[in-house]
Amino acid sequence: MIDVLGAAAAVHNVARLYAVAATGLGAAAYPWFDEVVAAARRTLGVPMALLVLVERSRQIVPGAAGLPEPWQQRREIPLTHSICQYVVGARATLTISDTSRDPVLHTSDAIRDIGVVAYAGAPVHGRDGHVLGALCAIDNCPRDWTAAEIADLGTIAERCSRKLRALSAPAALPSVAAETDPPPAPAPAAVVPETGLWTPQALPPDLTLDRRPPLRSAAAEVSLAGRWNGEPVAVLIRTADEPAAQARFRHRVAVTQAFRRTPPLVPVDEYRWHDDRVLVVSRAIGEPLQAGADDPPPPGQRLWSGVMRAAALLSTWHPNAADEHAWTVDYDAWIARHERCGRLSAEDARRLRQALRDCRGDRTFAHGNLTPRDVVRLPSNRFALTDFADAGVYLAGFDLAALALAAPDAQVRHALKLRVREADILEPFAVNLLLRVADEAARRPSIATPEGLARRHAALAGARRHARTLLSRLVP
């Protein structure tokens, strides 16, 4: 049986991610690996062979033979399509005769989008023995793998491992094709056990997990679907032990507990249970405003007015004065980080710091993730907010800045501007908007189509221009 939870822990192992980054390989063809996997394809008599390295939220393919388009050209595949991640978790060869009959893999997007039916993957190792990914052979019809075929696969995988070790820098470098800024110092040696996160007895007896690919993966955490007494729930799992991951998890727990009694017009995820690694919340049942990264945000003045009202209601909550320091966002550090990484010019940073001094006391609690993908419309036509990863005490207008980046048309953008003026929060809104643009520019998009990327680039460019125009008027 594939261990989904153990695989999640292994994939997010910080030391392993540094070892992947140390190879210097990215989402591009590497001729040596292309030649080796082409030979493996011929030796094993399969339509497809790949050399895959598994990163935090994607797998890159330095060597490919027979991979269908658009993947052959892109040389990267989302983790939702990954079977090689389970080789990383098991640290051993994995063979599947028919993925459509496997209790974990039968829902995998790799079956539909890539044509993976029979799979055999052997681990490839980097420095210090970390499993970086897999050399895999794939057939598009059911197949029983022979011992000789598995032996051949292992021999070729060892050749690939030697090459990966030769490519790796002596010390792992913090690049990891990261969606966010790289950490400032090298990671410690393995901080996450690769055999699992807990024993099944530690979970509540009323909770069952769906043994299928995660709903969402991010740095140091992964979300799985489950059921609590038959009701659908989301289960957030902390997958790393460093202090930053522990603090982030405690914050998530505090947010969900704080909103157990929610404003009446803004239902949010209901807190169910947690221990020091697992958080269970009810999943909002409703219609997502934006189901996928490529879906354009929905138009409609009425709908967006409702979402804006939801943001205003949510901001009426505020943490206790004794706990406020744990929720207050450090804007100075936020500006410095983006300036250091080149996403803010020196003039941008100067104006932001001046505006920050002018509105230092103008703070309110904000949701942090109020985008169309984090909002669902309930059958009652009310709105539910489904993710509280970045909740905190921001400058006023933070949620409106998030909505401005996703506004689908000029009418919605005009309504947002009117709300900003009516609330008299022009300075903090401008600060938030430019910083949100910098955040989005730092993230690697999950968008797949050229049209989706074009929409994203246009939205970021327009919001950046608007924020800079506002700041230039407010701060000479």
Image (cartoon, rainbow, N blue to C red):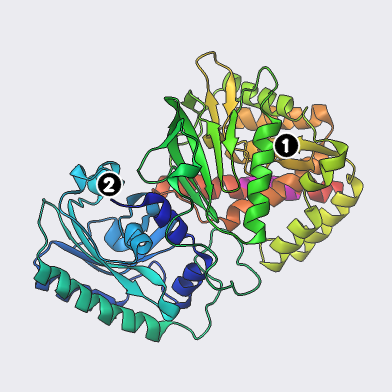
Front-lying residue, 252 or 414: 252
The location of residue 429, given as percent across then percent down, is 77, 41
Residue of label 1: 366
Q: Main secondary structure of the magenta part?
A: helix
Residue 460: in sight, yes or no? yes
* Label 1: how many Cα within 10 Å (few below 14, some 14–19, many 20+): many
Q: Which mark is residue 331?
A: none
Residue of label 2: 105
Type of amino acid under label 2 = Leu
- Magenta-highlighted residues: 462-468
* Label 2: how many Cα within 10 Å (few below 14, some 14–19, many 20+): many
The image shows residue 19, relative to residue 205, as above or below, that is below
Q: Secondary structure at mark 2?
A: helix
Identify the residue at image location x=52%, y=36%: 373
Which residue lies most toward the top here? 380
Q: Secondary structure at mark 1?
A: strand
The location of residue 115, given as percent across then percent down, is 20, 50
Q: Is residue 410 magenta?
A: no
Pick whichever of labels 2 and 1 is earlier in the sequence: 2
Q: Is residue 332 left or right of residue 401?
A: right
- Between label 2 and label 1, give the one nearer the viewer: 2
Q: Residue 71 sits in which quadrant?
A: bottom left
Type of amino acid under label 1 = Ala
Q: Residue 362 sits in which quadrant?
A: top right
Identify the residue at image location x=49%, y=52%: 445
The location of residue 244, given as percent across then percent down, is 66, 58
